[in-house]
Image: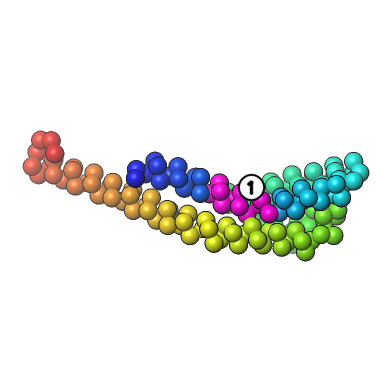
Amino acid sequence: MTIRRLKWRRFWLVVCSFLASIIPLGLVVWMHRDEYIATVGQAVKLSIGGIIVAILLLLKIIGKLKMPRRVTAFAMIFILSWLLAVVLQDLMLLSGAALIGEAVDEIFFRHSIKRLDERIHMEKSADVTVQKMEQMMQKYIGGRV
């Protein structure tokens, strides 16, 4: 396979991995949505809290989330707890769904992604080696190889 096809395959594995890890949690939230958004205030707070959590997850995924100082961390925990108070009553159910999603991700996708990363690296190394060999052959033999 070419490196481009391997990278495309890796992209889709990462997308499926992400979806597999959030789908169980999303299903639980969807099943209990009437309870979580019983009032407009709860819906707004839950939406704002969800956006903050999504931004934090995105920053963690791309590696830009740094550990804040303790005061900042506790302020974030307080704010998120207040915004997501409606869902905190189902924390055991939600954390179980998140655990199932992470387990599915770990079992079915992480190993494949790691293997694919290694294969992409090997293919790149092989391409560089072939190019260097061609340059050496042209240098010593001359002409086209």
Q: Which secondary structure lies at badge 1?
A: helix
- Residue 129: x %, y % from top left: 25, 49
Q: Above or below — where is 130 with respect to 102?
A: above
The magenta segment: 14-24
The residue positioned 59% from the left and 50% from the top of the image is 18
Quarter occupied by the C terminus: top left
Query: Is residue 75 shown to the viewer in this render?
Result: no
The residue positioned 51% from the left and 45% from the top of the image is 12
The residue positioned 39% from the left and 41% from the top of the image is 4
Check residue 10 for magenta coloring: no
Classed neighbour count for the residue bearing mark 1: other residues with Cα under 10 Å, few (<14), some (14–19), many (≥20) = few
- Residue 121: x %, y % from top left: 37, 52
Mark 1 = which residue? Answer: 58
Q: Main secondary structure of the magenta part?
A: helix
Q: As rendered, which of 111 and 131 lies closer to the eye? A: 111
The residue positioned 53% from the left and 58% from the top of the image is 108
Quarter occupied by the N terminus: top left
- Residue 89: x %, y % from top left: 85, 60
Question: Could you tell whether 32 is left or right of 126 in the image?
Answer: right
**Amino acid at circle 1:** Leu
Extreme residue in the left direction: 141
Query: Is residue 139 shown to the viewer in this render?
Result: yes
